[in-house]
Amino acid sequence: MATNQTVCRLLIGNELRRVREARQLRQEDAAEHLGAKITKVSRLELGQTRVTVAEVKMLLEFYGDDPQHIDAMLSLARNANQRGRWQSQPSQWAESFRLYVDLEEGAEDIRNAQAEIIPGLLQAEQYMRTMHSQALHRLSKPSVDAEVKARLGRQKIFTRDTPPAMSFVLSESCLRRQVGGPDVMRPQLDHLVEVAQLSNVQLQVLPFDTKTYPGATSFSFHLLEVGAPGIASPLSIVYVEGLDESRYLDDKGAVRTYGELWRRLTAAALGPAESIEFIRAVAERRA
């Protein structure tokens, strides 16, 4: 799997920080060795700036890193300034969401909990069109067509040569929330059943009457794990989308908290087979 520009930079930054901290060195020490300002090191570790092979080599050798790990990092750094799949073409998406799509494209494991609306990766085409045509800022038909085409392009991740492991927990609200009426919802539910039977997909439904932790079902979030050959620690990111802003969390405490929330939701939800039967039953009532 090719690793895109965004993911390369984030992986490199994650590893530079991890190795530096393991050697109990400060960002100030790294900046002095590079002959740069501390903000340079900070931005490198956050994946926010262009990284060169020479800088990665200088820092890792200064940290006394393992030669095999250095070689893997240098290989990653050589690809770090190539344009990502979604950055190399015009996009309908906001800049903040383009970062998510690049992460999604490079992820090995994707987990998504959704409280109200079918998530984009699981939407059937007519459901997408209805969502975009009835959006808060109503789009023209050409704009809707472009949005739908882009989202369908994302869905190719399910069947590529090396697809990620993909898990979804959907509240029963997602199945019953009216989007465009029965003519839209019935095909959408049928589409969910079809996707749920892919070998790399696990889909669970959280029914209304499930007893679980108070408030746990009200959150929608994505957990992504991104790895690269030869890199010791995967990149773990939580993505939380709001109406006017998106948040990317890579702090270990935040990732751990959302990971625990995910475990609670999957434990409370129906199993995959029971979930498929539940979706089929809802679909039959819409026939």
Image (cartoon, rainbow, N blue to C red):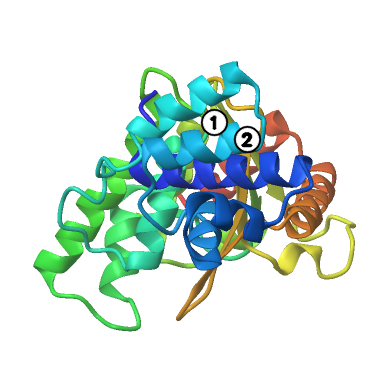
Alpha-carbon neighbours of circle 2 within 10 Å: few (<14), some, or many (≥20)?
some
The residue singled out by tag 1 in the image is 108
Residue 240, quarter of picture: bottom right
Q: CA distance from mark 2 to mark 1?
A: 9 Å
Residue 106 screen position, x and y as percent: 44, 36
Q: Is residue 63 above or below residue 25?
A: above
Q: Answer yes or no: do the residues labelled 2 and 1 have beta carbons within 8 Å?
A: yes
Mark linked to residue 97: none
Q: Is residue 139 left or right of residue 67?
A: left
Residue 268 screen position, x and y as percent: 84, 48
Residue 96 screen position, x and y as percent: 40, 66
- Residue at 15% from the left image edge and 57% from the top image edge: 90
Quadrant containing the N terminus is: top left
Disc 2 is placed on an element classified as loop
Q: As shown in the figure, which amino acid type bears the numbered disc 1? A: Glu
Residue 8 screen position, x and y as percent: 43, 39
Q: Nearer the viewer, residue 178 or 36?
A: 36
Q: Is residue 90 above or below residue 272?
A: below
Q: Is residue 175 left or right of residue 250?
A: left
Q: In the rendered image, is residue 166 in sight?
A: no
Mark closest to the chain's N terminus, 2 or 1? 1
Badge nearest the viewer, 2 or 1: 2
Q: Is residue 264 above or below residue 43?
A: above
Q: Nearer the viewer, residue 20 or 219?
A: 20
Q: Nearer the viewer, residue 214 or 189?
A: 214
- Residue at 51% from the left image edge and 67% from the top image edge: 39
Residue 185, quarter of picture: bottom left
The residue singled out by tag 2 in the image is 234
Alpha-carbon neighbours of circle 1 within 10 Å: few (<14), some, or many (≥20)?
some
